[in-house]
Amino acid sequence: MRPGTTAWERQRQRDAGGRARRRAGRPGPGPGNGHGDTSWAAVLSLMAAGVIGAAQIGKGSAALPVLQLEFGLSSSGAAWFLSVVSAIGAVAGALLGWLGQAVGFRRQVLLGLLAIVVANLGGAAAGSAAWLMAARVGEGLGFVLVVLAAPPLLSEVAGRGHRRLVVGVWGVYMPLGAGLATLLVPAAITLLSWRSAWLIDAGVTALVLLAVGRWVPSTPARRPQGTGGLLQAVRSPGVLCLAVVFGCYAGQYLAVVGLLPTMLVDGGLSLEAAGLVTGMVFLANVPANLLGAFLLHRGVGRWWLIVAGGGWVAVTVWAVHAPELPLPVRIGSVVAYSLLVGVVPSALFSGVVGMSAGTASAGAAVGLLMQGSSLGQLLGPPLVVAVGSTVSTWTGRPVALLFLAAGVVAGGLLYRQLERPLSP
């Protein structure tokens, strides 16, 4: 820069340089390249998007008894209504993540939120079970699009000093969103109606969509170079290890929390009280996610958090499924379980983003991780129930849960040897 250049000219030259870097696909100084400050408004907007996505899961569970009465859903129909969200991620998680990288992660989050808005409006007007199920598919698609694109975006808007913290905190979206919906949706249905609850959901989601559009910076779409990025993620031992660990974790967690209302009702609680306790157990997972993010920020190894979380299951799960213990003791055990086991998702999201950030495999790697989680959610509860039915409900279930927890611990120990960045 020549001597005597005015401040205005220097600023214009910097702007021109920034435009040139964006055209070339290279980041300049600022949030997301590791040199600038973290954009906290963007972080909060993306976190809100994840919470809204997860709320679709809790909303469906909380409203299911009312929907079964109004639409005459059978037990199998009710099960499909709940599981269709997980089914989309289980079938196409890695593929949708890879395609999302071509679309652009910010655009994918916006499309996902828009899908949730439209699906809620359609669901509120549903006149048949088929219409309601179609709207549920839209909610599931929106949820998957949001949770696949948000972690890479968080890595881009976070400065280097905050990246492990920000990506680690992302894991809080599921217990916070599902827990809040479990607590708030029944109240909205009681005061108004389930259709009004759907309309409120659409309105809140629209506000989050506007926040993402306002605060999250645009990212250039990256045209896939064939299927190289997808194949690299699928062939990565580290990414596959984390996906399997997430499957084991999600399977045992959903089995514990999903079967909890039945256990509580069998123990003498009303259905409303059982729902309240279940929502509190969901929310109890939030401090664990935050603790995991804090420990990652302080330099604790990801593998250590995975192993510790898996080991904690063995300490707490026996008391949860011990019918001879007083119900308050069993409730306390499941709350204690949820309070610490949540360090695992923080480590998993941080690990997969740490390996794939900035590469052609970023979207596919996160998609594969979520695919493992979705498969665990689909298969974990049936596995636990099947083992419990074969052996003894209150003996077999802890054994099945310990089997899944052992998978988490073994995966954490293996990941210690496999943690390495993917190629650009």
Image (spheres, helix red, strand yellow):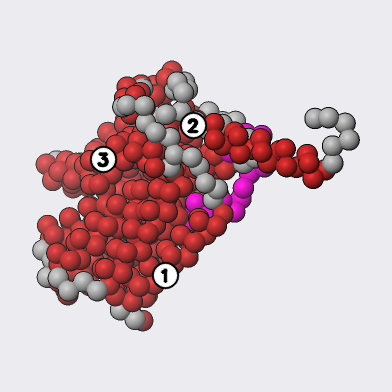
- Earlier in the chain: of badge 2 and badge 3, it is 3
**x then y, percent, for residue 371:** 30, 38
- Look at 34% across and 81% down and name the residue there: 192
Question: In the displayed structure, would residue 26 be above or below residue 168?
Answer: above
Q: How crowded is mark 3: few (under 14 residues within 10 Å), some or many (20 or more)?
A: some
In the image, residue 45 lies in the stretch drawn in magenta: yes
Considering every residue shown, the one lying at the far top of the view is 417
Distance CA(mark 3)–CA(mark 1): 28 Å
Q: Can residue 37 be seen in this view?
A: yes
Crowding near the residue tagged with mark 1, few <14, some 14–19, many ≥20 C-alpha atoms within 10 Å: some
Cα separation, mark 2 vs mark 3, equals: 21 Å
In the image, is residue 18 part of the stretch drawn in magenta? no
Identity of the residue drawn at 50% across and 55% down: 212
Earlier residue among tags 3 and 1: 3
In the picture of the structure, the residue carrying the numbered disc 1 is 203
Residue extending farthest to the bottom is: 191
Q: What stretch is highlighted in magenta?
A: 32-48
The disc label shown at residue 25, or none = none
Residue extending furthest toward the right:
4
Report helix, strand or loop for mark 1.
Answer: helix
Residue to which mark 3 is pinned: 92
Secondary element under disc 2, as helix, strand or loop, is loop
The answer, for residue 167, to whether it is visible in the render is no
Nearest the eye: 284 or 56: 56
**Residue drawn at (32%, 26%) of the image:** 226
Q: Residue 357 carries which label?
A: 2
Amino acid at the residue labelled 3: Ala
219 and 6: which is toward the camera: 6
Q: Are marks 1 and 2 in contact (CB under 8 Å)?
A: no
Q: Quadrant of the N terminus?
A: top right
Q: How crowded is mark 2: few (under 14 residues within 10 Å), some or many (20 or more)?
A: many
